[in-house]
Image (spheres, rainbow, N blue to C red):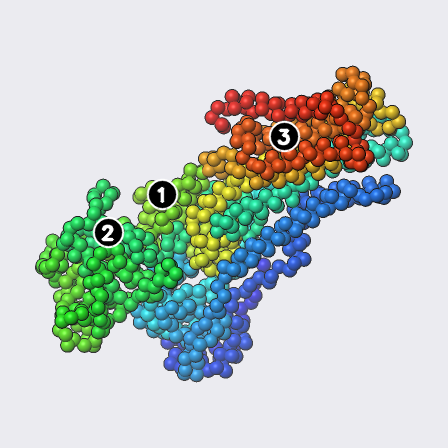
Amino acid sequence: MATSQQRVPPPSVPMPAPDPSVREAHDVAVDLGVDPATGLTAAEAARRLAADGPNELRSRPPVPLWRKVLDQFQDPLVALLLVAVAISLAVWWVEDAHGVPVDAVVIAAIVVLNAVLGLVQESKAENAVAALRTMTEAMSTVLRDGRRVTVRSAELVRGDVLVLAEGDAVGADARLLSATALRVQESSLTGESEAVLKDAAALAAPAPLGDRFDMVYKGTAVAQGVGRAVVVATGMSTQMGDIARLLDSTEEEVTPLQREIAHVSRVLGLTVIGIAVVVMVLAAVVNEVRTPADLVTVLLLGVSLAVAAVPEGLPAILSVVLAVGVQAMARRNAVVKKLHSAETLGSASVIASDKTGTLTKNEMTIQRVVTASGEVTLTGVGYRPEGEASVPDGDGGALPLTDERLTREAVMVLGGGSLANDAQLLESDGEWTVQGDPTEAAFLVAAHKLAGTVDRVAGFERRGEVPFTSERKLMSALVDPPGDGAWALVTKGAPDVLLPRCTDIQVGDETVLLDDDRRAQALADVERLSRQAYRTLGVAYRRVPEDTGPEGLEEHESDLVYLGVVGIIDPPRPEVAAAVAEARRAGVRVMMITGDHPVTATRIASDLGIVEPGARAVTGTELDALDAAGLRETTRGVSVYARVAPQNKLQIVDALQADGHVVAMTGDGVNDAPALKTADIGVAMGITGTEVTKESAKMILGDDNFATIVAAVRQGRIIFDNIKKFLRYLLSSNMGEVCTVLLGVVLAGVVGLEGAAGGEAVVVPLLATQILWINLVTDSGPALAMGVDPETDDVMARPPRGPNERIIDARMWTGVLSIGLVMGVATLLTIDIFLPGGLVEGRDDLTVARTAGFTTLVLAQLFNVLNSRSETTSAFHRMFVNRWLWGAIVLGVLLQVAVVEVPFLQVAFGTAGLDLGHWAVAVGMASSVLWFDELRKLVWRWRHPAGG
């Protein structure tokens, strides 16, 4: 696909260096022709906007209605039916166009119904996706003419000076001019769960995207602090624009079901042509065609049989079954955008999942508090302030927290971290959110889990603070306790920076000297937590005089009393471990692909059961060094990938697909979008997912719940099973019609048809109208009912089907042919029983005998409904679980009674009334289909006791 050319700015606005992160901010501003103190003038900004275009990603134009309608007719099976319509119309025209071309009208109506179903369902999916979008328009604060103004982010231009504050969305890629305690949440772009501390100092050398600390990027958000930055790229020139271009270059995969239906359509097309030719040749030879009228009769027979052999209801039934499955998924918060994608999840052999926000909560949580007297474990996940405190028992279990000294120390750690804090914990309608840095918010949440902590810090007033910077790696707050207590300076920060400033350590109610042994133990605790993938923050304090002012507080950040250290992590969602276990039971491999640190990634993957403890994680840098063969070998054995870039995700998906896997890729960030589009089915997060990701995905999770994906896998497998059921039924039933006509023509003399011909030039066991009736009565209702059949077996107890495994495999074809042959033989034997001559001497005329055979074939197909629910399980297993199926069977019987016994229907379909003897024979002969298949299944189960 062609990409739009980037406009070159006028000579007065030179292009900045390719990588502004390694250049001084002042030099970048000079290159862009802007004074950082005043920003651009309004006139210059307007001129640049006109030259460069709006700060927007290129979007695809909406698909027009006519194109959507045309897409509904792209299915090869629909094309086959349209050919059948054309042939039926041609025969009708050759026969002087008498009456209404019923065959053509019925088939055309089914094709139109199929198209309407597809359009309606896709429209519902589009509406659901639209309902998930955020309706607010992004705004940015910039300097224009020396004043702060708020403009639409789409109007930002290169050279604009952004004014960044907590809670702002970054509107464009920009080089920092200044930063004060500035932390930016970049998980949507890099996959890094932790807010990144920014620094305006130029980098010494080019660095990966997640390590460019002097840059901010479009689509990210300010979590804490303030800063200013000069815009260096807008629109498609941003990092997000690069990903959008990558999306344009990735091709959407055809679903396995679409490939399989195309294969089935080709096979059916060739089979139909072959059947028509064979029947016409045999009919011409056996009946010695001599006149043009005889030839037209033979041609009509061949065409009628060809139309009968095509399961014309299949596209509509397939659409209905997929639509029902899609609705079932929607009830579980999984919005499927394309019908055919519903089944694809059922055949997925790999779920390649992003970590942050998908497998984890994307909510930093304190789980460990380590002090001089021991360790406290806190339960609970995310920002909901619910959980309990306990102590580890050494065997992986937990004991109640009863040690008063340890409790007091832990309360002081969490209380100190809550005081040296700028975050807020908010509750609205039962939902908890945070404002500010997620790491600081973790202290506020943890304080509610340890009794006495919230009460201890209540009433403290802040008198001053020293903000966190990348150089200091510390943050201090001057606090005044309620009453007449002494003021205190509470400091938190990186333990390796904080401990050298400490001279004492808190032990219960006392402070003791932080000697070498205690210092070594504190450092060992920090190292242990780090090895367990926790981010560590130490907390300390000291008393200060009440007249201490906010100025010069840094001078007091010494001689501190060390309180302890906390272990913080973005924890797994509580329901994910069970979902991963269920996926593994179903033979589906779960992989983690993230931009986070390898240690953190392997820890989370181990907790969730994706890998065993100690498993290896491969980084994006390592992937870049591999050739195609090495990449495929790596993806076969490694399930955790960390520090990956968007192109690495694409590489992994491509390697898995090249290895024969059906890949479901989940994610929420912009960085996931290209891989989601390339995967067999991309799954986006509906709540935290970006719009780019949602547009690229085939399925959107309304609740961002990984367990919903596994539930959708189950539903996809049920859909596939039901597709096989109605395919088995439709094809074997239609094969029964083919065998009846084919054998009836060849064996006309054997079964007495030839002697009963009278004045007919070509004698057939069934009339064309009767064949059409069979298709109308037995094809649609029972097949639709099977499409909503409940899960008969545990679909998650078997491995996913292989990508080359046919829906209609050799075993199914054998069953289709054998059942069709039994139907044909039973129908012809019924005719023979009532006709004079043949193998059995009868006394009825051709109309009665043909009606009895016609009824036998209809009832045999209704018995076949029960057979077709499983290839191997008895029809009597869970026989009555599907009331719709029994409703379809009863309706089919009543309609057949009507067409046989109602006078005006007798005239229309060439039938005659039957007595009880005729009905008894028809029912008995039709039931042979059921007993034959039960015997076949019994033999199969005896030969395959393990079900293989």
Label 1: which residue? 609
The residues tagged by marks 1 and 3 sit, at their Cα atoms, a distance apart of: 44 Å
Residue plotted at (76% across, 16% down):
840
In the rendering, at what x and y percent does residue 122 appear?
Answer: 59, 53
On screen, residue 648 above or below 429? above
Earlier in the chain: of badge 1 and badge 2, it is 2
Q: Amino acid at mark 1?
A: Gly
Residue plotted at (73% across, 46% down):
108
In the rendering, at what x and y percent does residue 640 appear?
Answer: 38, 47
Label 3: which residue? 864
SS for tag 1?
Answer: loop
Earlier in the chain: of badge 3 and badge 2, it is 2
Label 1 crowd (10 A; few <14 / some 14-19 / many >=20) = some
Label 2: which residue? 389
Label 3 crowd (10 A; few <14 / some 14-19 / many >=20) = many
Q: Is residue 728 visible?
A: no
In the rendering, at what x and y percent does residue 210 appear?
Answer: 38, 60
Where's the N terminus, which quadrant?
bottom right
